Image (tube, helix red, strand yellow):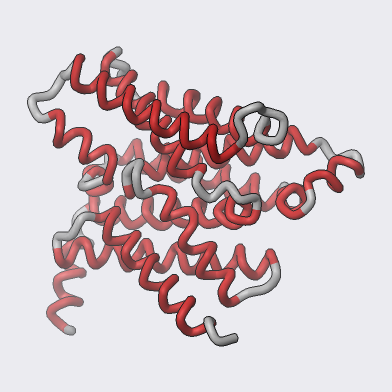
């Protein structure tokens, strides 16, 4: 035990480890806040779909040699999220089908562009890193950490400020609309927040695993709590703890960061399911 403590103390002397923990905890916290809403609105798979859109946008940014891929990835992902969430009820192609279609198309286009207009000798490695977030969180710059902190504060502030509205559109959007609430605006707000979380989260767990970061803590919390507020609070706590433990385990045993965090989340969910199964 003392060896582990000494090893952690040694690693935490390096700025990149501190950056990884800060970013990991913040992204996990933000992801868990909207995860409850997505699960209850039956949009659990949207994180996966939007992450593939972000992957395709990132590939386009690389081909165009954009200085920061975020300049391309963020607006494209936001547009996709708005189209999916706002038009899900009126569109001819319903939510789950639209997510599946956009997800597969974006992933295919992104991979094709990265192969045709390759700017790296190791395309497979670049793709794997983007999809699974292999080491990117351990190579963050201070400017990237600052951007993550700023966006995380904005996301948390918006969620707290519009908590009652988000609660209303989560459980009964038709009733909320009948009372005069601008449900379209709040659906757009939720879509934008989700898109921002997806883009930020790609540095942590990669595009294929980001949906797990959004969904697992919410599902675990739902096994223990019965109120919306209780689920949100417990989901946030579990998500932060799992992210922190995942990063620590990854550093100590040299495992992939994203996969390790998701594995910890999965273990917590399995434990919650087994304990609460008989109740």
Q: Quadrant of residue 154?
A: top right
Q: Position of residue 272 (x, y in %)?
A: 48, 77
Image coordinates for residue 18, horizontal then vertical, percent? 29, 56
Tell me how many marks there are: 0
Q: Nearer the viewer, residue 36 or 100?
A: 100
Of the pair 173 and 163, the residue shown nearer to us: 173
Q: Where is 17 relative to 225, above or below?
A: above
Q: Residue furthest right?
A: 179
Q: Residue at x 69, y 38 (%)?
A: 187
> Left of 235 or right of it: where is 255?
left
Q: Quadrant of the C terminus?
A: bottom right
Residue at 39% x, 65% y is: 265
Give the vertical position of 177 relative to 32 (above or below): above
**Lateral position of residue 11 relative to residue 100, left or right:** left
What residue is drawn where x is 49% and y is 56%? 215
Q: Mark yes or no: residue 43 visible.
A: yes
Q: Quadrant of residue 231?
A: bottom right
Q: Is residue 204 visible?
A: no
Q: Quadrant of the N terminus?
A: bottom left
On screen, residue 135 versus residue 220, left or right, reads: left
């Amino acid at each position: 035990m003392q060896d582990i403590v000494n090893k952690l103390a040694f690693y935490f002397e390096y700025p990149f480890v501190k950056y990884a923990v800060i970013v990991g905890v913040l992204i996990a916290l933000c992801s868990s806040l909207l995860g409850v809403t997505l699960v209850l609105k039956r949009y659990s798979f949207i994180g996966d779909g939007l992450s593939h859109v972000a992957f395709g946008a990132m590939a386009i940014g690389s081909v165009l040699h954009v200085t920061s891929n975020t300049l391309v990835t963020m607006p494209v992902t936001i547009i996709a999220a708005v189209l999916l969430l706002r038009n899900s009820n009126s569109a001819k192609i319903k939510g789950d089908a639209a997510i599946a279609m956009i997800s597969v198309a974006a992933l295919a286009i992104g991979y094709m562009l990265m192969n045709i207009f390759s700017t790296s000798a190791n395309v497979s490695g670049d793709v794997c890193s983007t999809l699974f977030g292999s080491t990117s969180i351990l190579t963050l710059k201070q400017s990237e950490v600052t951007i993550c902190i700023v966006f995380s504060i904005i996301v948390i502030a918006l969620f707290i400020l519009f908590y009652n509205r988000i609660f209303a559109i989560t459980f009964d959007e038709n009733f909320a609309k009948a009372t005069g609430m601008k449900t379209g605006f709040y659906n757009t707000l939720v879509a934008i927040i989700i898109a921002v979380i997806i883009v930020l989260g790609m540095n942590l767990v990669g595009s294929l695993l980001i949906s797990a970061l959004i969904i697992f803590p919410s599902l675990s919390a739902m096994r223990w709590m019965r109120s919306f507020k209780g689920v949100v609070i417990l989901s946030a706590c579990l998500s932060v703890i799992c992210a922190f433990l995942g990063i620590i385990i990854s550093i100590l045993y040299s495992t992939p960061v994203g996969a390790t965090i998701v594995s910890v989340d999965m273990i917590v969910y399995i434990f919650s399911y087994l304990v609460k199964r008989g109740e």
